[in-house]
Amino acid sequence: MSIILDSKIPSGPLAQKWSSHKSNIKVVNPANKRKYDVIVVGTGLAGASASASLAELGYNVKTFCVQDSPRRAHSIAAQGGINAAKNYMNDGDSVYRLFYDTIKGGDYRSREANVHRLAECSAGIIDQCVAQGVPFAREYSGELANRSFGGTQVSRTFYARGQTGQQLLIGAYQAMMRQVELGRVKLHARTEMLDLVLVNGKARGIITRDLTTGEITRHAAHTVILATGGYGRIFYLSTNAWNSNCTAIWQAHKRGAAFSNPCFTQIHPTCIPVSGDHQSKLTLMSESLRNDGRVWTPKRKEDIKKDPSTIKEEDRDYYLERKYPSFGNLVPRDIASRAAKEACDAGLGVGTGRAVYLDFRDAIKRDGEKTVADKYGNLFDMYSKIVDENPYQSPMKIYPAVHYTMGGLWVDYNLMSNIPGLHVLGEANFSDHGANRLGASALMQGLCDGYFVIPYTIGDYLASQSFEKVDTNHPEFKASEEFVNAKIGALLKNNSKATKTTTEYFRELGLTIWDHVGMSRNETGLKQAITKIQNLRNEFWENLKIGSTSSEVNKNLELASKVADFLELGELMARDALMRKESCGGHFREESQSPDGEALRDDANYSFVSAWEFKGVDKEPVLHKEPLIYENIKIATRSYK
Amino acid sequence: MSTHEQSMTLNLKVWKQKGPKDSGHFEMVTAKNIIKEMSFLEMLDVVNEDLIKLGKEPIEFDSDCREGICGTCGIVINGQAHGPWKATTTCQLHMRAFNDGDTVILEPWRAKAFPVLKDLVVDRSSFDRIIASGGYTSAKTGPHPDGNAMLIPKPIADRAFDAAACIGCGACVAACPNASASLFTGAKITHLMMTPQGQAERERRVVSMVDRMDQEGFGSCTNIGECRAACPKDISLDSIAIMKREYMNAFLKSDIEQREVREDA
Ligand SMILES: Cc1cc2nc3c(=O)[nH]c(=O)nc-3n(C[C@H](O)[C@H](O)[C@H](O)COP(=O)(O)OP(=O)(O)OC[C@H]3O[C@@H](n4cnc5c(N)ncnc54)[C@H](O)[C@@H]3O)c2cc1C
Ligand code: FES
């Protein structure tokens, strides 16, 4: 199957595209909806909201997740907030401004039409969540509260203390559980999708493994939705949850779905620094902290080991405020992260040398400890539990960590991949954030995709197809099941004589990606990374010690299966980064920078979305390009100075 | 990283159970090279790596976010659900809490409604079914009144949030001598009861959730309060009182309504 990239962006003026598209697309009549089976993989914001909404419409939904309960999907961990163009603050916000900020924040590497739709739908998301009883933060007036986030100059972020993702997800989960009770959603928790099944080129089902019993099962449907989150855990150390993975989208890629912009990953500037080799994950300190916290390092190397409270004002370098006076501490994430790395590379890092200060001294002096605790109390608690220091008294130490992946499966305007019938929502697709995502916009996108886009566009797909009858006895299902069994068999085959564990491979891969496909990249490093990953992959399949060979609960086997896929995806990330010789957003190519060290985009040559076609594990993938056309926004150098 | 050199050795007494039907037993495992900076789960990661290298079965346990918000982790540590630190999940507990040479006992959540799947991994889907029975507002996806159309005073919104902060980990059940799910169920009832959007289904919700809780095999609440002590999110015991009151009210009201219906007929 050769790949055709048709973005299906509706014609007409930008602000009318979505409404006219909605009026023009086909709908499935209510009585027919129950004749369609829809598979939803994932129960994060995107998957839970899609499952609930589609079941409410009358479709038969089957929903899957790897956690023991759908409420535990990784979206639960989002802290800071969700954007919406409500303009409640009367500070000049509008749909256009949100759209503009998001495109600019993404360093002009996202699609205008998708981003505009996202901005249009944002206000309705808040209303939807309020109707579900989501306890957003409120002012004393009883009105919804807002705060500001990086990369914008208005306050449009809605939040629920430092647990916004949790509250939004619980809202969507509850709506979905209502449908489970009504029998319209069949829920399969602790169940992992291991392959996508295509029949005559259309996505018609999946193969799963029950993580409790080990049973492999075939599931057929008329269409499949993947809402399986991002692949940031490929770095081993990241802010992503333990079970986050790329398996579902990677298998779909191997079955023909184009993978877009895999090298666009986001390194978040404010995370708790690495403390040692034992570390299993990194903890994010929400970006909202940069509203009140000031980032600095000592000016002189001899001060880096000193007690920070003894360092005088004139000996501190508030480097973000110095370099970017108009945005100060609120510059976008990619810029803040790179600036922290630069400071540490220059020998000014504190603590282990890989940390900078985030200081609340002035905020506490200005507003009092109580106000600061009200806003950030749970984050401060989390920090002191991990680090054993009191951030009310001494500044936090922070360092960048991998947090989000902008890349993902290519989708058209209807959120369908190039495989007919395969839809991709949330972080798993590539669609809205270009080369850098602004804070508080992933939650917005996940819920927009699930509540307000897919319920319309899936109807259009289903109504415009004629479906042959396919059940799980079809030979394609059998072939897929055999493929899955073979993969599990291969993972276990050398267990008894092998010497190297899954975790050892995973760490090695993670370190390679961090060193060469992390915060800054260059040609030599990327080429090295490709070779290293290939070698590691070969070794993995020959010398992998899993420990238990149990076919029942076996978490190491689960992990190994994920690592196997990361070992293939990692190579593609490096290839994508190597191909893109410009710097943009989170992708910083050392060869392409301005004299003052800022990222230098190359619009003439790289204003496109990369979409890679899989050709075989040890074969070179083929690059396809979707050109990015800006009709409404004038492309400019992104400046936050 | 000065404390790194001072590594500890601990003796773990771990519950091993092959599956739901196996009767299970304790096994002793030595945890070597443990440092204070490790989280409790990172300590188990290190132990499992050692076991795997020796060709032994690792200890199975659940975790996901590893930052105290998803509610996936949960081990009874030395008799306490989530271990010795107050308002802290197992994944947030750090090895600073232990000393070299300590014996540490690890057990799964134990409750009839939470069958053990393997070692420290339990099935908590009964919690999902309690939510499914009524823990929602029936607002469908679609257009709704503006988010500011109904004002919610900050203190009320804060109380709703405090209850909604429950992470559904099940420590309350594990800590309760009766294995009651009242704190969990009460928290959801309190959250939704506080918000204006939750009013329409207020009575129906409490009756159906409390009934489901009983059907799932959870015990009844006798006001012991161990749940609160174990709760990593400090959910208030008030939510249980609220649940009981709401249940009574709903019962009386439905009784009156039914009588009225009968009289009308
Ligand atoms: C610590 C942290 C804080 C964040 N804070 C914010 C914030 O403040 N604002 C913001 O906008 N964004 C934030 N983000 C980003 C945002 O949370 C995520 O991008 C978003 O929640 C992703 O949602 P999702 O529905 O796409 O996927 P997820 O929530 O990751 O859900 C993925 C689902 O897929 C399932 N799954 C995965 N693979 C399989 C498989 N093979 N088989 C079956 N099921 C599978 C999982 O079980 C899960 O249910 C944060 C992210 C992190 C890590
Ligand atoms: S693993 Fe998420 S709360 Fe512990």
Image (cartoon, coloured by chain):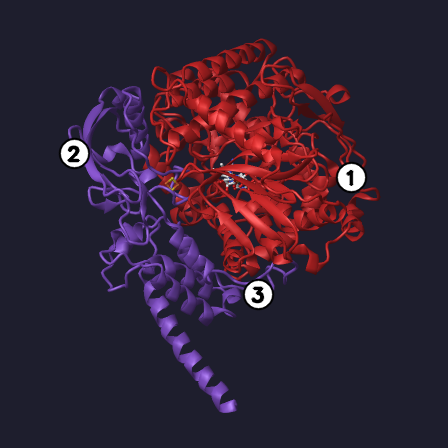
Label 2 lies in what chain? B
Q: Amino acid at mark 1?
A: Ile
Going 28% across and 47% down the picture, which residue do you hit? Answer: B109
Chain given the colour red: A
Image quadrant occupied by the N terminus of chain B: top left
- Residue A378: percent from left, percent from top: 40, 45
Label 1 lies in what chain? A
Going 69% across and 22% down the picture, which residue do you hit? Answer: A601
Q: Amino acid at mark 2?
A: Thr
- Residue A75: percent from left, percent from top: 50, 42
| Residue wearing tag 1 | A9
Taking the image as shown, residue B53 lies to the left or right of residue B253, namely left
Label 2 residue SS: strand
Taking the image as shown, residue A383 lies to the left or right of residue A169, namely left
| Residue wearing tag 3 | B150
Q: Alpha-carbon neighbours of circle 2 within 10 Å: few (<14), some, or many (≥20)?
A: some
| Residue wearing tag 2 | B103
Q: Amino acid at mark 3?
A: Met
Mark-to-mark CA distance, 2 and 1: 63 Å
In the rendered image, which quarter is residue A230 located in? Answer: top right
Mark-to-mark CA distance, 1 and 3: 37 Å
Is residue A604 visible in the rendered structure shown here? yes
Taking the image as shown, residue A404 lies to the left or right of residue A316, namely right
Colour in which chain B is drawn: purple
- Residue A282: percent from left, percent from top: 42, 31
Q: In this picture, is B199 found above or below A55? A: below
In the rendered image, which quarter is residue B159 located in? Answer: bottom left
Label 3 residue SS: loop
- How many marks on residues? 3
Going 38% across and 66% down the picture, which residue do you hit? Answer: B211
| Tag 2 near tag 3, CB within 8 Å | no
| Tag 2 near tag 1, CB within 8 Å | no
